[in-house]
Image (cartoon, coloured by chain):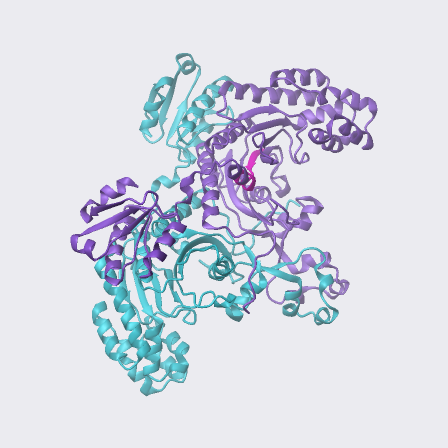
Chain colours: A purple, B cyan
Amino acid sequence: MAKKPSIPKGTRDFSPTEIAKRDYIFEIVKKHFRTFGFQPIETPAFENSETLMGKYGDEGDRLIFKILNSGDFMSKVDDATYGSKNSSALTSKISEKALRYDLTVPFARYVVMHQNEIEFPFKRYQIQPVWRADRPQKGRFREFYQCDADVVGANSLLQEVELIQLYDAVFADLKLEGVTIKLNNRKILAGIAEIIGAQNNLVNFTVALDKLDKIGVEGVKKEMLAKGMSEQAIAKARPLFELSGTNAEQLNTLDNLLSDSGEGSKGVEELRFIINTIDDLGLQSAKLEIDVTLARGLNYYTGAILEVAAPEGVDMGSIGGGGRYDDLTGIFGLKDVSGVGISFGLDRIYLVLEELGLFPETLDKTLDVLCINFGEKESMAALKLVTLLRYKGVKADVYPSKAKMQKQMKYANNRNIPYVILIGENEMNHKTFVVKDMASGEQKSYGLAQIQDFIKTL
Amino acid sequence: MAKKPSIPKGTRDFSPTEIAKRDYIFEIVKKHFRTFGFQPIETPAFENSETLMGKYGDEGDRLIFKILNSGDFMSKVDDATYGSKNSSALTSKISEKALRYDLTVPFARYVVMHQNEIEFPFKRYQIQPVWRADRPQKGRFREFYQCDADVVGANSLLQEVELIQLYDAVFADLKLEGVTIKLNNRKILAGIAEIIGAQNNLVNFTVALDKLDKIGVEGVKKEMLAKGMSEQAIAKARPLFELSGTNAEQLNTLDNLLSDSGEGSKGVEELRFIINTIDDLGLQSAKLEIDVTLARGLNYYTGAILEVAAPEGVDMGSIGGGGRYDDLTGIFGLKDVSGVGISFGLDRIYLVLEELGLFPETLDKTLDVLCINFGEKESMAALKLVTLLRYKGVKADVYPSKAKMQKQMKYANNRNIPYVILIGENEMNHKTFVVKDMASGEQKSYGLAQIQDFIKTL
């Protein structure tokens, strides 16, 4: 019975300090979501299995946590299936619900189910945990929050512009300077593949191109050759590998390279509109950069592709990403609803802020004032004062028992409480209270009628 | 594929309006949790099955949602167990994790696991969903939020006093006047059972007594007789059925009734301390009442028992409850840690506020300003203005496409947006914008340099 308790691997408890830091990020993100006109929704932790299965590929299907049916679930399994003892055949017989794997599919399901109540265009945000039966490793968890903002039912490129502004607004507010927002367009990747004759090899082409950073030009060429692209095709793509200069210069290079591809030219045009509009509006602290190697789940996106890189010098993958996908709700039978969205990588943003020391120090302050407990009568006087302080919004407490003074002071110290209040017999008689500043050690006496003066010092 | 999507029974989607209302409640509750010195923790959605199973009785065990193991889960089932095709025998072989059923057991597990990092007394709050495979019905869901505040490691009755103040502070802030906080003590119930010679029938005695409201004195007597209590015993308990008058008068009656029971007298003493202290401190709007029929999961509580009733005239069960339990963490091997806590019934509080029209009207305002889109050039000017407004914290948006004026105005109407901004060619030339007040229909023109004047009107 009294076995040492534990939690499932890949899951986490969050302590008060950790929650204060996470909430700091969430509150800033939500504030900007709201000023940008996004509205919150929430969906259930589990969905009907048929809503989730088949939406994330075979690997995704395996990583979805399934919930066992209640009651005598085995009685509904036919003998033939039972006889096979085949886990995957049995799963669909004994499990009808599964934990949310991401927020996008439940959102698509939400839009279809509530299409008659929703005013389109619909800008929604959603911040909820998701669960994946992934192998846990450093920075990868089986339970983690996703934090998404999407617009559905709006085709205008102004949405892409606003999402870039939104990233900038959030990271500026978090004081996280030097983030780079990388921008690409699926149509450009498709255009290049068309030009070099690799239309039917688009995924392999982009997967290889995506590795340019890590394996260099020669590595990419080698991989493209291995994946069946010709020397000639790769030579044609050469300008891509050497793309450099300002965004405007890169746009010109791409324009020339893709002039024979209708789709490619459209991609360049879209990219140019977004870049020029952002140039015109200005960003607070982020940098916007074209990155034609950016692919991110290519099969999903149909237009813009976005990714946010942490400031240089911080060893962290992307801290956000998104893009446009033209058929969000088609899987649930509602056609022609375009979506574009971004997400914030909470866990990574947390680590970056921690590494750079960007969390405000005040987050640690869980209590403004602790009243020392000198005994039954004194603690009643203390509780009266604390009641007034709380009423004024001050985070205040009375130590719950008449413990040794040293123990109570140690408690205040360990909890980083800035002020300790002392009300002994003398103070009770004189209707006063003594405030000790824990940092400086200074003590000051106030009359009970001057409580407001004390509150002002906080 | 395109089957009409649905969600599992007993679960809910939350729309932006519902979330605004829920958040309104949560934010007020959290504000007071914090001023009372409580700190937030969060625990994973699923726990190891052994953490949860056996903690909620047989019925609870059945209502816990179990998660199917990943991979080839059946391969680990031995042939004998498999041959039985017995669902309950198989469950523990194919499932090692289960969804959180309440917040109390995970909290006890948290305290034991983190005992070396925690400063005791530890006041924690926790607001997270829980899941129960209950039969869904009106007001009962399979996924719902619990909202708990508990103190562990403090034996003082000041905790009970503070928890009553906390209820009062929250309901006063929610403008929910006329709630009654009912107070009882397990020791009083045990004392009465002792006096009437029903010590070994305590649960049946209290279950019957708990029904006094519904089935009246005669009904209660009948049930007690049926459960094996004697006429004589029931006659002795008679003063209980007729308990009336002020709290002080009831305390005197109880004192007399229980003078021969050590435990009962202790209970009266505790009750008296709490009642007197609250009398002394005063409450903002709640009423505190002794209710000796209150039992609430008796086997759990060891001291005070609390329950909050909605204002008279509102047909709703309790909207909160709690009490003291002396051995919270014993189930995980940490002895002698006393706990006392309360919870808020979010879904019911929501319904009560809705019924009484107590949600602020401003919650509906998801956007302060919508800029009409008159075309590409004009929408750029609108986006510039909107960018400035957002930067100042105004919730603002540009309609994403050049739709018909009528359609855009209808959208603003449907979304309850109070102001619409018009920037046409004329306004662009004169560097102005026109604000239309959607309620009055009035229009006013501002220079772009006077944007601050407009913001002041919001």
> Which quarter shows the N terminus of chain A?
bottom right
**Residue at the location (51% across, 42% down)?**
A126
**Image height check: is B446 above or below B131?**
above
Residue B197 lies left or right of residue B269; in this view the side is: right
> Which quarter shows the C terminus of chain A?
top left
**Residue at the location (55% across, 18% down)?**
A276
Q: Position of residue A248 (x, y in %)?
A: 61, 16
When asked about the image quadrant of residue B249, the answer is bottom left
Q: How many marks?
A: 0
When asked about the image quadrant of residue B258, the answer is bottom left
Residue found at the far left of this picture: A430
Q: Position of residue B151 (x, y in %)?
A: 39, 59
Whether residue B344 is visible here, answered yes or no, is no
Q: Nearer the viewer, residue A308 or A120?
A: A308
Residue B19 lies left or right of residue A230; in this view the side is: left
Q: Nearer the viewer, residue A81 or A270?
A: A270
**Image height check: is A276 above or below A101?**
above
Q: Was residue A201 drawn as part of the magenta stretch in this picture?
A: no
Q: Was residue A345 drawn as part of the magenta stretch in this picture?
A: yes
Q: Position of residue B253 (x, y in %)?
A: 23, 76
**Image height check: is B380 above or below A4?**
above
Whether residue B381 is visible here, answered yes or no, is yes
**Residue at the location (40% across, 62% down)?**
B153
Q: Nearer the viewer, residue B194 or A163?
A: B194
Q: Nearer the viewer, residue A146 or B204?
A: A146
Which residues fall within the magenta stretch? A337-350
Q: Position of residue A172 (x, y in %)?
A: 48, 30
**Image height check: is A309 above or below B380?**
below
Residue A391 lies left or right of residue B9; in this view the side is: left
